[in-house]
Image (cartoon, helix red, strand yellow):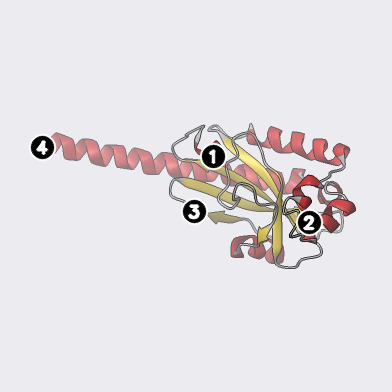
């Protein structure tokens, strides 16, 4: 019985140590993302036409906004490649996603670029835009990184994305799971 208790405590300590190590890794990647992501380029990703359709609701065509989602391919690809490279800085599998405020709708945000694992504590599959979570609002207002543990077994660090004037124009979400399940987010 004593050995079981010792093994349990050793395993718990090991899990906590690796968990805090994961926190530090993800925070480091978020710090790098805040420096590497170009907010001026991120603002160009979604086209003006696409922004207009995002806010037009048509009861006869509920998929109108999604069907008319359009991006500037150069800005999209440049940012997507940077996000993918940032994800390689984590020793464990992680995603770096880009969230942008919806210009014509204060208090709304959209995931502009998702990455390979589709890991996010905030995104609901199929939603083009959603109410801005308080943690994202904090990042936009303060420009500080915020660590989030909303879902059990998941860690995210939200980092500011700044334009050339230093204004926070978007949010990078560096997200990982304590226990990886590659099929969890694509069911």
Residue 180 shown left or right of residue 31 in the figure = left
Pointer 3 residue: 149
Q: Position of residue 108 (x, y in %)?
A: 70, 63
The residue sitting at 12% across, 38% down in the picture is 2
Q: Vertically, is 143 above or below 186?
A: below
Disc 3, disc 4: CB below 8 Å?
A: no
The residue to which callout 2 is attached is 54
Q: Earlier in the sequence, mark 1 or mark 2?
A: 2
Q: Where residue 26 appears, x then y in whole percent?
A: 57, 43
Q: In this rendering, which labeled residue sits more in front, label 1 or label 3?
A: 1
Closer to the N terminus: mark 1 or mark 3?
Answer: 3
In three-dimensional space, the C-alpha distance between marks 1 and 2, rounded to whole angstroms, equals 24 Å
- Judged by depth in the image, the label closer to the viewer, 4 or 1, is 1
- Left or right of 132 in this view: 187: left
Image coordinates for residue 139, horizontal then vertical, percent: 66, 61
At x 35% / y 38%, what residue is drawn? 14
Residue 1's disc number: 4
Q: Is residue 46 left or right of residue 13?
A: right
* CA–CA distance in space, label 4 to label 1: 39 Å
Which is closer to the viewer, label 3 or label 4?
3
- Count every numbered label the image shows and give the total: 4
Q: CA distance from mark 1 to mark 3?
A: 16 Å
Front-most of residues 106 and 9: 106
Residue that carries the numbered disc 1 in the rendered image: 185
Q: Residues within 10 Å of mark 1 (few under 14, many from 20)?
A: few
Among the two numbered marks 3 and 2 on one chain, the one whose residue lies closer to the N terminus = 2
């Amino acid at each position: 019985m004593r050995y079981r208790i010792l093994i349990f405590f050793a395993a718990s300590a090991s899990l906590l140590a690796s968990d805090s190590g994961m926190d530090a890794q993800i925070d480091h990647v978020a710090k790098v993302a805040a420096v590497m992501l170009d907010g001026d380029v991120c603002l160009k990703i979604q086209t003006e036409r696409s922004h207009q359709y995002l806010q037009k609701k048509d009861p006869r065509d509920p998929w109108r906004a999604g069907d008319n989602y359009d991006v500037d391919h150069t800005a999209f690809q440049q940012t997507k490649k940077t996000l993918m490279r940032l994800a390689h800085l984590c020793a464990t599998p992680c995603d770096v996603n880009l969230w942008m405020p919806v210009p014509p709708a204060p208090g709304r945000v959209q995931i502009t670029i998702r990455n390979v694992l589709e890991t996010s504590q905030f995104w609901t599959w199929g939603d083009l835009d959603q109410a801005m979570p308080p943690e994202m609002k904090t990042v936009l207002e303060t420009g500080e990184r915020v660590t989030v543990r909303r879902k059990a077994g998941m860690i995210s660090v939200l980092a500011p994305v700044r334009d050339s004037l230093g204004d926070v124009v978007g949010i990078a979400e560096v997200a990982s799971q304590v226990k990886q399940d590659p099929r969890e987010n694509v069911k």
